[in-house]
Amino acid sequence: MKKEIKIEGMSCAHCVMHVKNALMEVKGVKDVQVDLKEKLAVVEVQDADNEALKLAVEDAGYDVTEIKDIK
């Protein structure tokens, strides 16, 4: 399953890596692609819940505005 996470507060490549590393630490996350221009992350997950994903991004210092399932 893939999820799209809309993220506010990213402004550079360092932010992208910070968000990617934070999401990769969440149990059940298989892959993460972060798009700075679109201000979102696409996360491939297996049994990872939205709250854990949101908490990881917020703990990294960014704001999650939406999480939705995508195909």
Image (cartoon, rainbow, N blue to C red):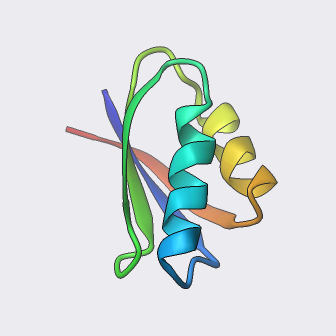
Residue 48 image offset from top left, x and y in percent = 54, 22
Q: Residue at x 59, y 26 (%)?
A: 49
Q: Nearer the viewer, residue 48 or 15?
A: 15
- Quarter of the picture holding the N terminus: top left
Residue 30 image offset from top left, x and y in percent = 38, 25
Q: Residue at x 56, y 71 (%)?
A: 14
Q: Is residue 32 above or below residue 6?
A: above
State left or right for residue 42 relative to residue 58: left
State left or right for residue 41 relative to residue 7: left
Q: Residue at x 59, y 35 (%)?
A: 50
Residue 62 image offset from top left, x and y in percent = 70, 66
How many numbered circles does the render carry?
Answer: 0
Q: Residue at x 68, y 33 (%)?
A: 52
Q: Is residue 23 above or below residue 44?
A: below
State left or right for residue 28 relative to residue 46: right
Occupied quadrant, residue 65: bottom right
Occupied quadrant, residue 19: bottom right
- Quarter of the picture holding the C terminus: top left
Residue 41 image offset from top left, x and y in percent = 42, 56
Q: Residue furthest left?
A: 71
